[in-house]
Image (cartoon, rainbow, N blue to C red):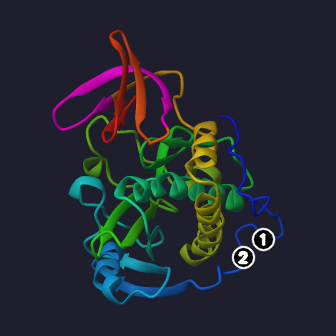
Amino acid sequence: MASVRPASGGSTFDEKKQGRGAMTWPPGHERRVLASVDSTMAEAARRSAVLAGPEWILAERQQAARGRRGRTWRMPEGNFGATLAMPVNGAAPVVALRSFVAALALFDTFVAVTGRAEPFALKWPNDVLLNGGKVAGILLETHQGGRVLAIGFGVNLVETPAPGEVEEGALAPVSLASETGAAVAPEVFLDHLAAAYARREADFRTYGFAPVREAWLAGAARLGQSITARTGTSETTGTFETVDPSGNLVILTSKGRVAIAAADVFF
């Protein structure tokens, strides 16, 4: 897998900081660590009306965590579940491009805590893979008429979902500990992720989506290979050609190119 281009803040890995949480917390970002909550996404929604600036919400336990399309998601203790809630401007399609920003920040964080880039890949639209299995997922929701964005991050640090909890046909889940041997505490992971996201967000606001897209494609899983994209009403199989400037998945089929805004991808 080609390496993802670092954010403009510089190298994403420092051996002296690996796994020790020795990151500078981004200025102006609040940090809330909860012992237990229904879900960090629900907590972000409740706090959206009073949000003054970016705020990270980390929970040790979540009783009602959820993924995309309302799917339930169990978070074993020791895994990572957090939400970044932040005020945003711009049209909904532009705000939605933060899923790519978030994926790059997760990639940077995995490199920071393992010192390795090659086992990780980015799966459209919202997953990070490790040795071909799913290690992390991202969920985006907006509140207050689109003025507040909540980005949920779920990472299998130490444990994976049970087989019965995995959607049929989906990639097998893996954990960071089992695949790399890295033992990373959730708060340490948050230190790295918050710093990485702040760098990637700054680049996105300064330079737009083009460099984010370029960096994301450099780490994309199955680029140039056969994939299947399923929506609620259709299925498209072909070659994963690119992600277009609007963030759509572009598949080359026997009938031509198809641009897909939202789907689940299987391979």
The 10 Å Cα crowd at callout 2, few under 14, some 14 to 19, many 20 or more, is some
Q: Is residue 234 magenta?
A: yes
| Residue on which the image places disc 1 | 17
The 10 Å Cα crowd at callout 1, few under 14, some 14 to 19, many 20 or more, is few
Q: Position of residue 48 (x, y in %)?
A: 33, 82
What's drawn in magenta, residue-wise? 229-244
| Position above or below: 50 against 176 | below
- Amino acid type of disc 1? Lys
Dominant SS in magenta: strand
Q: Position of residue 202 (x, y in %)?
A: 63, 66
Mark pair 2, 1: CA separation = 7 Å
Label 2–label 1 contact, CB within 8 A: yes
In this rendered view, identify the residue nearer to me: 180 or 118.
Answer: 118
Return the residue found at the far top. Answer: 254
Q: Which residue does the image show at 64% across and 51% down from the upper left?
A: 180
Residue 238 in view here:
yes
| Residue on which the image places disc 2 | 23
